[in-house]
Amino acid sequence: MKKLILSALILFTITATQAQNVDLRRKIEVSGTAETEVTPDIIYFSISLKEYMDGRNRVDITTLENQLIKAVADAGVAKEDLTINNISGYTTYQKKKDPNFLASKQYRVKFRDLNKINQILGAIDPKGIQSTYIESYDYSKIEDLKKELKLKALIAARDKAAYLLTGIGQKTGDPISITEIDNGNNFAQPRNVMYMAKASNADVAAEQDIDFKKIKLTFQVNAVFEIVK
C-alpha cells in the first residue's frame, strides 16, 4: 500500500510539473524579409602565363612574370594582393628532360577597381597570356550589411504581426522566439567568367569600364510573438 501511495505521489508530481511547463500563452508566428542590392567591390582575378617560342627564341616565364609584377605595381595594386595559384612544369628537371617544354604559372590578383584589369593585361606580352578569368568576388562591408538586413527583417516580422492582430482587436506582445533563415547569401561563385588568349595589347586596352551587375541579398527571420489584449 505504501508503495502504491508513493507511486501515485510521484506520478502526481510529474504531471503537475509537466502542466507547469506547458506554455499557455497565445502566440502568433510570422516571417519578415529584408533585401538590398550591392555591387561587389573586391574581385579575385586569375591570370595564367605561359612560355612561348618566338621563332627560335624562348620567351621564358620569368620575363612574363616580371611584366606582371611591374604592371600590378604600376596599377597601384598592393604587392600582397598578387599571389601564385599554381605552377606547371616549372622545374629544372623537366627543363632538362624536355628542352621544348613550355612552363606556365597561374597568378591570383585581388582587385578593388575592375578597370585596372585592362591596365594590367595591356602591359603584359599578349602571347604569354594563356587565359584569364574571374575566380570569385566579395563585398567589403558584407558583415555590416548582413546585420542591418537581419534587423530590418525582424522589424518587418514585428510590423506584420502587429498589422494582423490589429485586425482582430489584439496586440503584439514580447517576442517568444526568433529564428534566422539561411538564404545562402554569399559571393563565393562568380556570376561571369572572362577568358582571353592571344589577344593584342591594343585589344585588351580597348576594353573599358568593366563592371558587375548588382547582386541581391535577401534575409528572412521567423519570429513568434505573444498575443496580448
Image (cartoon, rainbow, N blue to C red):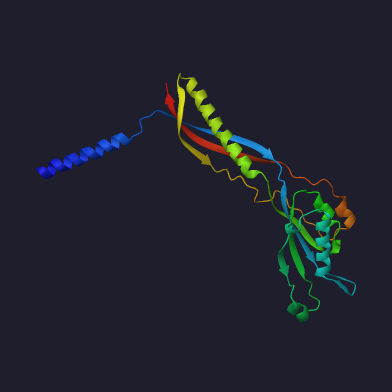
Q: Is 15 or 82 nearer to us in this picture?
A: 82
Q: Does residue 112 lie above or below 90 as drawn?
A: above
Q: Where is residue 13 in the image (x, y as percent from the top left)?
A: 23, 38
Q: Does residue 119 lie above or below 27 as drawn?
A: below
Report the label total. Answer: 0
Q: Which residue lies furthest to the bottom in this view?
A: 97
- Is 27 displayed left or right of 221 in the figure? left
Q: Position of residue 136 (x, y in %)?
A: 69, 52
Q: Residue at x 86, y 62 (%)?
A: 125
Q: Is 215 or 25 nearer to us in this picture?
A: 25
Q: Position of residue 114 (x, y in %)?
A: 78, 49
Report which quarter residue 128 is drawn in.
Answer: bottom right
Q: Is 223 or 191 nearer to us in this picture?
A: 223
Q: Where is residue 51 in the image (x, y as percent from the top left)?
A: 81, 69
Q: Does residue 196 lie above or below 158 as drawn?
A: below
Q: In which quarter of the image is the C terminus?
A: top left
Report which quarter residue 26 is drawn in.
Answer: top left
Q: Which residue is drawn at 66% across and 44% down?
A: 141
Q: Which residue is drawn at 84% across and 47% down?
A: 208
Q: Which residue is drawn at 52% across and 29% down?
A: 158
Q: Does residue 81 lie above or below 99 as drawn?
A: above
Q: Which residue lies furthest to the top in this view?
A: 169
- Is 83 displayed left or right of 149 in the figure? right
